[in-house]
Image (cartoon, rainbow, N blue to C red):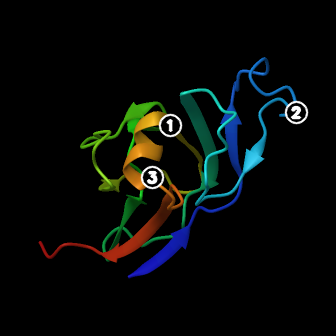
Amino acid sequence: MHAIRLRGGWTLANPAASIDPTLPPNPRLNLPIHWPSSLPRLVRLERRFNSPPVNPTLERVALRLEAVPGLLSANLNGQPLPDVNPANHAVVVHVNLTPRSTNLLTLEVNLDIARQLLQNDPWGCVALEIQPASPQ
């Protein structure tokens, strides 16, 4: 298995500028993160990434989200990912990515739940995993 961590390049989409006027529009951030207390209770993160080169007869791609309590929804290219629950700390989903395409991962997070369940630990370890294909 090979992991491609999606640490940098995240955008905090549409933050409430009135809550923290020091934030630039759509600030960039890295995961994992200790959430600033100045952010609103609900936030949306977006991350674009290219499809990794895989041989579909030998490999498959999974999206692994760990340390993500408070995750209300996760969408890949506009399609909801299954098994997302705010109480879950981890989600692993096999995904179909189109070769040579740019993908958009969107995460909606309730920071009250995230802070309560993680306490002082950082939030969000996200990675693509290239795994061997299941035997047929």
Q: For the residues marked 1 and 3, what is the alpha-carbon distance in whole angstroms?
A: 29 Å
Amino acid type, mark 1: Leu
> Where residue 111 is drawn, which disc sits there?
1
Give the structural element (helix, strand or loop) at label 1.
helix
Name which residue type carries label 2. Thr
Which residue ends up furthest to the top in the rendered image?
Answer: 18
- How many marks do you count on the picture? 3
Q: Position of residue 1 (x, y in %)?
A: 38, 82
* Residue plotted at (70% across, 41% down): 11
Q: Quadrant of residue 14?
A: top right
The reply, left or right, for residue 56 in relation to residue 17 is: left
Mark sitting on residue 22: 2
Residue at the spot 41% in from the left edge and 58% down from the top edge:
67
- The answer to whether 24 is drawn above or below residue 16 in the figure is below
Look at the image and tell me whether residue 110 can be seen: no
Q: Residue at x 26, y 73 (%)?
A: 133
The spot of residue 52 in percent (x, y) is: 54, 66
Q: Nearer the viewer, residue 97 or 14?
A: 14
Q: Is residue 54 left or right of residue 57?
A: right
Residue 24, labelled with which disc? none
